[in-house]
Amino acid sequence: MEYKVLKPKDNVSENEKKEIADFLYEHLDQFGDEHKYILKCINFAIDDVNRFGGFVITSKDGDKMTGAVVVNKTKMGGYIPDNILVYIAVHKDYRGKGLGKILMEKAFELAEGDIKLHVEPENPAKYLYQKLGFTSKYLEMRRTEQ
């Protein structure tokens, strides 16, 4: 398995960003977002354009993408975690083999400061997150524009 870390200033091509967004869109299953929002999040993490930044980690088995993680930095450490793990997905053929845990641990190594994530109550990945030390401190509530 080959792992790659993408950060701001890495000059990531639009094709590579699209490949990652396509992968996440497909493998997040019902827990994902629209493709355009996934791509927007990737751009926020790795584009060097007056933003907080973040990073993307991908895993590949040969030419086949097997996993991806997108972390955005908040720069709000202390009252809001320094990092938000926005997306993590593992290819369906590689699930249950420890790849999700490896990707999470690599994200922990790269993140400077605390990390938070949002997980749907019925998402089976929440058990992995709990094993890795994530706790549920708050109930999230949102108001979206109509």
Image (cartoon, grey):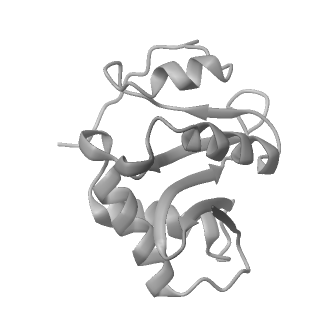
Residue at 62% from the left image edge and 18% from the top image edge: 131
Whether residue 118 is visible, yes or no, is: yes
Residue closest to the eye, 10 or 76: 10
Q: How many marks?
A: 0
Pinpoint residue 109: horizontal percent, then vertical percent.
81, 45
The answer to whether 93 is drawn above or below residue 47 in the figure is: above
Residue at 38% from the left image edge and 63% from the top image edge: 23
Pinpoint residue 116: horizontal percent, then vertical percent.
61, 32
Residue closest to the eye, 61 or 127: 61
Quarter of image, res 56: bottom right
133 left or right, relative to 38: right
Whether residue 75 is visible, yes or no, is: no
Pinpoint residue 73: horizontal percent, then vertical percent.
68, 51
Pinpoint residue 121: horizontal percent, then vertical percent.
35, 18
The answer to whether 145 is drawn above or below residue 20 in the figure is: above
The answer to whether 144 is drawn above or below residue 39 in the figure is: above
- Quarter of the image with the N terminus in it: bottom right
- Quarter of the image with the C terminus in it: top left
Quarter of image, res 52: bottom right
Quarter of image, res 104: top right
Residue at 68% from the left image edge and 19% from the top image edge: 133
Residue closest to the eye, 90 or 47: 90
Q: Residue furthest left?
A: 146
146 left or right, relative to 125: left
Residue closest to the eye, 26 or 31: 26
79 left or right, relative to 22: right
The answer to whether 17 is drawn above or below residue 134 in the figure is: below
